[in-house]
Image: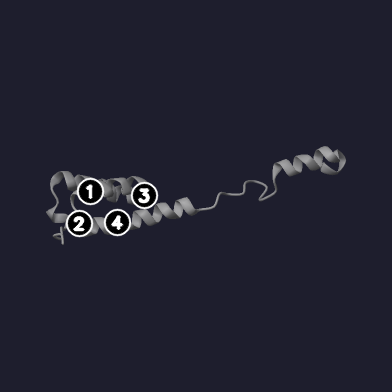
């Protein structure tokens, strides 16, 4: 197994990377936090606080990717369908 590491036990370079990742999460930049934390945890697999934050960041990025695209100004009314109706009967289209 691996040895558990706390935030206080991090080397200065690792601590800087940890601080950048936590700031990225606070500023809603979960994708950047994921990349920082993955690199950090490759070197320090026992850093449990990093693992927790990585899970949160991955969850946030999956929520962003799963969000449906907005339907736009006219909802699900397609502009091509509207254009066809106007071309077929211009008086009714106005």
Categorize mark 1 by other alpha carbons within 10 Å: few (<14), some (14-19), many (20+). Answer: many
Q: Which of marks 1 and 3 is nearer the N terminus?
A: 3
Q: How many numbered circles are shown?
A: 4
Q: Which of marks 4 and 1 is nearer the N terminus?
A: 1
Per the image, the residue denoted by label 2 is 47
Residues at marks 3 and 4, CA–CA distance in whole angstroms: 10 Å
Q: Which of marks 3 and 4 is nearer the N terminus?
A: 3
x and y, in percent, of residue 17 in the image:
22, 45
Disc nearest the viewer among 3 and 2? 2
Q: Is mark 3 on a helix, strand or loop?
A: helix
Please name the residue shown 16% across and 62% down the image: 1
Q: Are marks 4 and 2 in contact (CB under 8 Å)?
A: no
Per the image, the residue denoted by label 1 is 40
Disc nearest the viewer among 1 and 3? 1
Residue furthest front in the image: 1
Per the image, the residue denoted by label 4 is 53
Categorize mark 3 by other alpha carbons within 10 Å: few (<14), some (14-19), many (20+). Answer: many
Residues at marks 4 and 1, CA–CA distance in whole angstroms: 12 Å
Look at the image and name its color scheme: one colour
Q: Are marks 3 and 4 in contact (CB under 8 Å)?
A: no
Q: Is mark 4 on a helix, strand or loop?
A: helix
Left or right of 19 in this view: 30: right
x and y, in percent, of residue 70 in the image:
58, 49
Residues at marks 3 and 2, CA–CA distance in whole angstroms: 19 Å
Which one is in front, 3 or 12? 3
Residues at marks 2 and 1, CA–CA distance in whole angstroms: 9 Å
Q: Are marks 2 and 1 in contact (CB under 8 Å)?
A: yes
Residues at marks 1 and 3, CA–CA distance in whole angstroms: 15 Å
Per the image, the residue denoted by label 3 is 30
Residues at marks 4 and 2, CA–CA distance in whole angstroms: 10 Å
Q: Which of marks 3 and 2 is nearer the N terminus?
A: 3
Q: Is mark 2 on a helix, strand or loop?
A: loop
């Amino acid at each position: 197994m691996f040895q558990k590491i706390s935030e206080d036990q991090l080397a200065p370079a690792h601590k800087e990377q940890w601080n950048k990742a936590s700031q990225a999460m606070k500023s809603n930049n979960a994708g950047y936090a994921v990349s920082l934390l993955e690199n950090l945890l490759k070197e320090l697999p026992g850093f449990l606080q990093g693992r927790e934050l990585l899970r949160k960041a991955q969850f946030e990025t999956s929520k962003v990717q799963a969000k449906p695209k907005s339907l736009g100004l006219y909802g699900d009314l397609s502009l091509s369908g509207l254009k066809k109706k106007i071309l077929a009967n211009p008086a009714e289209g106005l």
